[in-house]
Amino acid sequence: MKKLFFVVCYFCIAMEGCDRVDRRLANDTSKKENTFNNLKDRIVGIWAAMGEENATFVIAKDTITYPDQNASYTYALVNDSMLIRFDGYIGRYLVKIKTSDTLILTGDDQQVYYRLK
């Protein structure tokens, strides 16, 4: 009887540990999704290069449009990087939001943009 009691106790403890791991993994996944959605929400807008008065590009939910070139491309965010599917190649840029109105994209070089209102 004591062996059965210990087996049941061991099983209960193991299940509680598994449940904690499941909750922790769910929390981590939720935090990553929130960070991703937050970045995507924050970069949507009309952006101009520093020193320019006209829009350099417009970022929408799934596309980035360059008004001067009359061209739109799809993009994806992967962690803190933006992948833009240009014609013939994929541009990769590290994305940083310095303030709500300052966007820094780093590829081969670093470019700073400000939000047009």
Image: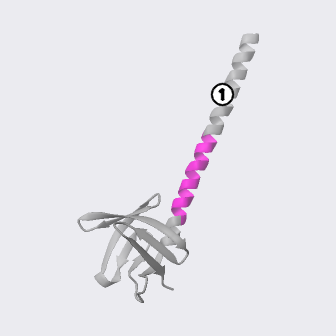
Q: Is residue 73 left or right of residue 21?
A: left
Q: Which residue lies furthest to the front in this view?
A: 109
In the rendered image, the vertical position of residue 6 relative to residue 27, given as above or below: above
Q: Which colour scheme is used?
A: one colour
Q: Residue at x 43, y 73 (%)?
A: 60
Q: Is residue 90 left or right of residue 17?
A: left
Classify residue 56 by image quadrant. Answer: bottom left
Q: Residue drawn 58% across and 53% down?
A: 30
Q: Is residue 26 magenta?
A: yes
Total numbered labels placed on residues in the image:
1
116 or 51: nearer the viewer = 51
Q: Residue furthest bottom?
A: 53
Which residue appears at 38% of the width and 66% of the height?
Answer: 75
Q: Main secondary structure of the magenta part?
A: helix
Q: Which of 3 and 69 is in front in this view?
A: 69
- Relative image position of residue 68 (x, y in whole percent): 31, 84
Q: Horizontal and vertical percent for residue 49?
A: 41, 81
The span picked out in magenta is 22-38
- 55 relative to 1, above or below: below
Residue denoted by label 1: 14
Location of the N terminus by quadrant is top right
Residue type beneath disc 1: Ala
- In the image shown, does 32 or 101 lie closer to the viewer? 101
SS assignment at label 1? helix
The quarter of the displayed image where residue 77 is located: bottom left
Q: Which residue is drawn at 66% across and 30% down?
A: 15
What is the crowding at mark 1: few (fewer than 14 residues within 10 Å), some, or many (at least 20)?
few
Please tell me whether residue 114 belongs to the stretch shown in magenta: no
Task: Measuring from the top left, give residue 70's x and y in whole percent.
Answer: 30, 81
Eyeballing the image, is 116 above or below 83?
Answer: below
x%, y% of residue 29? 55, 50
